[in-house]
């Protein structure tokens, strides 16, 4: 019978497009990698990989088998986690994906609290693009995903946690910062700075700009909330910033004024997700409870 290791090698080749790179990722020699894939092909009696000067390309049946192999490998890791959990309670390492617009401003106290409650549980945090990480979660490359809704995936359990207010901010010397309450019509024509369009927050900002006849500045995409902060403070335009970012540290608002816009009720919904068949449900719900409690404590009555 084919082995899980052989399927793991095949998946690594699919991800890297090269026997040499796949061998390096798997920490084996290239001849070993090639030999094991040929053994898998012989066992299945079908060609899985086309080998050429340009690299390794999966055949159509190879691509189909890789899709199934990813699920098999994820299931095998879940089995190992289930066995470890049964033997030792909440233990092991959980790979948590999150967006850089949320994780850095929420996770530090949560990780400390979790360590006190479950000292043998470890969180490996990886920041990335939400839609890409949802795919990684489904493929078993992540165990847990914390980020804004919507989260797509028929095989995922998605638990909404809290609503985070989003605020419109300006430089201290911006014309809209001079008075008190800002009329909605006064936003028209002003430039709104955003992140990379792949972030949910950037899409919300674009929708907000369209609703208020604002302009999105395409040449000034921020790489992080900190970079948005600095660009706004320097007078390049307005920006939409999350409440957790502004409230976690009083210094977050340095150089900025939160605009009091008439009728302003803008927020994003934050959720946590895991694969529906994962055996780590108890650990994931513990983390969800900690995230929810910590966020509500910081946000207060926002």
Image (spheres, rainbow, N blue to C red):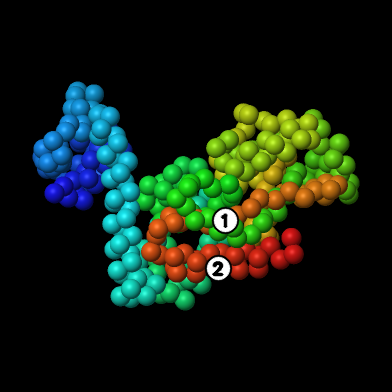
Q: Who comes first in sequence, dot 1 or dot 2?
A: 1
Judged from this view, the residue extending furthest toward the top is 53
Give the secondary structure at mark 1.
strand
* Residue at (28, 40) in percent of width and height: 66
Residue 244: image location, x then y, percent? 64, 57
Give the camera-side residue of 90 and 252: 90
Q: Quadrant of the C terminus?
A: bottom right
Give the camera-side residue of 67 and 37: 67
Res 23 quadrant in image: top left
Q: Which residue is mark 1?
A: 271
Q: Does residue 224 sit above or below 295 in this rendering? A: above
Give the camera-side residue of 229 and 144: 144
Res 248 quadrant in image: bottom right
Residue 282: image location, x then y, percent? 45, 69
Give the camera-side residue of 239 and 9: 9
* Residue at (25, 29) in percent of width and height: 59
């Amino acid at each position: 019978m084919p082995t899980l290791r052989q399927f793991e090698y095949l998946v690594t080749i699919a991800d890297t497009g090269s026997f040499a790179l796949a061998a390096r990722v798997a920490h084996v020699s290239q001849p070993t990698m090639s030999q094991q894939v040929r053994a898998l092909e012989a066992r299945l009696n079908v060609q899985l990989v086309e080998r050429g000067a340009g690299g390794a390309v999966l055949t159509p049946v190879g691509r189909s088998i890789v899709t199934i192999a990813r699920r098999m490998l994820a299931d095998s890791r879940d089995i190992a986690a289930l066995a470890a959990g049964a033997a030792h309670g909440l233990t092991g390492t959980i790979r948590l994906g999150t967006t850089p617009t949320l994780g850095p401003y929420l996770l530090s106290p949560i990780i400390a609290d979790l360590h006190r409650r479950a000292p043998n549980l470890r969180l490996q945090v990886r920041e990335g693009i939400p839609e890409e990480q949802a795919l990684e979660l489904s493929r078993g490359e992540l165990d847990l995903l914390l980020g804004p809704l919507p989260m797509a995936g028929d095989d995922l359990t998605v638990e909404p946690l809290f609503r985070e207010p989003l605020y419109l901010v300006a430089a201290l010397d911006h014309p809209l910062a001079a008075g008190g309450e800002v009329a909605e019509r006064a936003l028209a024509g002003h430039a709104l700075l955003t992140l990379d369009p792949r972030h949910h927050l950037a899409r919300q900002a674009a929708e907000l700009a369209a609703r208020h006849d604002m302009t999105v500045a395409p040449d000034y995409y921020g790489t992080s909330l900190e970079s948005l902060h600095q660009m706004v403070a320097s007078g390049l335009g307005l920006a939409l910033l999350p409440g957790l970012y502004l409230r976690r540290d009083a210094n977050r608002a340095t150089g900025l004024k939160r605009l009091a816009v008439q009728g302003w009720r803008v927020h994003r919904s934050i959720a946590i997700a895991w694969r529906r068949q994962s055996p780590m449900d108890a650990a994931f719900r513990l983390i969800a409870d900690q995230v929810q409690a910590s966020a509500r404590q910081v946000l207060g009555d926002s």
